[in-house]
Amino acid sequence: MLSSGVHGLLMSPDSVVDQLAALPVFQSVPRADLEWLAAHGEMRSFPAGSVFFNSTESMEDMFVLIAGRLMLRMDNKAGGSRTLLRAGAGRVLGTLPYSRFQRPPGTTLVDEDLTVFALHQRHFPAMTHDHPALTTALVHHMLDRAREFRTVQLNDDRLQSLSKLASGFAHELNNPASAAARTAQALVGLLEEESAAARELIAAGLTGEQLAVVDAIRAESTRPLAPRSALEAADREDDIAEWLLRHGMDAQAAEPLGASAVTIPTLEHLSRALPPDIVRHVIRWVANGAAAREASRQIENASCRIHDLVRAVKGFTFMDREGVPEPVDVARGLADTLAMLEGKARAKSAIVRYETAPDLPRVEAFGSELNQVWEKLVDNALDAVGPQGSVTITATARGDSVVVRIADDGPGIPEAIQTRIFDPFFTTKPVGQGTGLGLDMARRIVQNHGGDIDFTTQPGHTVFRVRLPATAKP
């Protein structure tokens, strides 16, 4: 008779064997092996809502899920938690023969009333020696489990990265969008003011000679203005404001006129050629026209910024591409990644330098996965540097490979943890602020693409180097 678990279950050995034999994982296992398994383990039950295992405990048992459901929860930065995966009847969890699994990355909770069969790892030597069919079935299940968990990890890490990037991207997108909306609203008023001034000029019945003077200042206000320093621009605006005040006009027009090519001699000529009341209407008309054109340029710039950000997101995620390997432009991927992280770099006042060799070969890859590598490495570099710190990214061709280097002038990686930074779930960030998946996932992605990743570090200079095989010319 098997001993009881958390909530005692009394079952005959035959009943336990029957339940094990009904599971897909054991369908090819001889009944004699399952009888041995039933004789050396125990049935346990857990109520829904209870903690099955937490990340601080070492796992010494293999658990075969007979009925019910488990879920693995991990902390997130917001102070809550998220579900990484769920497992139901037929799954084998915990430690397995030949497995290096020691503890779960988060807290494992009972989602539905659970019944499991537990076998302590002290029985593994006898199992592997005397029951090869049972051992083989468990090893195959372990490999399937490892592949599934890696996929879950990759997808979860990608979602976490995109969530973090989306927050910064929303801020980056909001700035030009808000600017465009504000400017478009102001543009309506400027056009109405320009139209009102034009009607006043029409009503004035100007002569042909007077209209020529008005046309001249209007044309001058539309010509491109040579680049000027901020001090020169301020001095020019002050000069025009003084001229307007001397002639009894509103100095508010000085800003748009100062930003145009209108000169003081042109204003003087206007004041001599037209009556003062007409000059006011002309100044109003020209100033509002100049302001409207400047508003139009600002809307165009904001729209272009939005377009560039959306293009960067599409390039970063490869959202318009098939999910198959293809020749990938590494330089473009790095540029899109830097665009996604521009807000973070600006918030830290970090200096980001980027240089790529001309005619850089392409690599056969999943572009979105490579961009995930660049995002992890650049994001870590920005975390490492202080205010005014420097991050340098280079991409060069070396023989039949493309080599990307991401360097920072931060304090370096402490020697005590240098051998662990690629370990799954290892992180130096506070609880809830890091999954510990970043560098582990980066290494897996690079290796899956036939490349390698390494680093050198010392105070003031840390360099991560990624080598990928080149397969196609640009």
Image (cartoon, grey):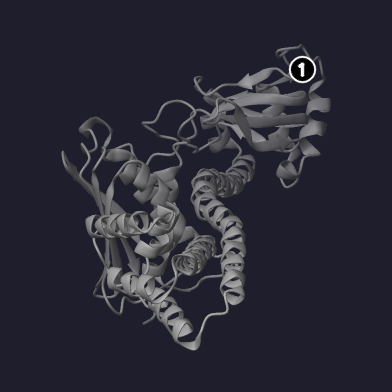
- Amino acid type at mark 1: Pro
Residue 218 occupies which quadrant of the picture?
Answer: bottom left
Residue 402 occupies which quadrant of the picture?
Answer: bottom left
Q: Is residue 275 visible?
A: yes
- The residue depicted at 70 percent of the width and 36 percent of the height is 87
Judge the density around disc 1: few (<14), some (14-19), many (≥20) Cα neighbours within 10 Å.
some
Can you say whether 319 is above or below 23 in the image? below
Q: Is residue 261 visible?
A: no
- The residue depicted at 58 percent of the width and 72 percent of the height is 198
The quadrant of the image that shows the N terminus is top right
In the rendered structure, the answer to whether residue 444 lies left or right of residue 239 reads: right
- The residue depicted at 41 percent of the width and 81 percent of the height is 213
Residue 388 occupies which quadrant of the picture?
Answer: top left
- Toward the viewer: 455 or 124? 455
Can you say whether 264 is above or below 220 in the image? above
Q: Residue furthest bottom?
A: 208
What residue is shown with label 1? 47
In the rendered structure, the answer to whether residue 307 lies left or right of residue 12 reads: left
> Where is residue 12 drawn, in percent x and y?
82, 20
> Where is residue 143 drawn, in percent x and y?
57, 47
In the rendered structure, the answer to whether residue 25 lies left or right of residue 142 reads: right
> Where is residue 15 drawn, in percent x and y?
83, 26
Number of marks in picture: 1
Q: Residue furthest front?
A: 275
The quadrant of the image that shows the C terminus is bottom left
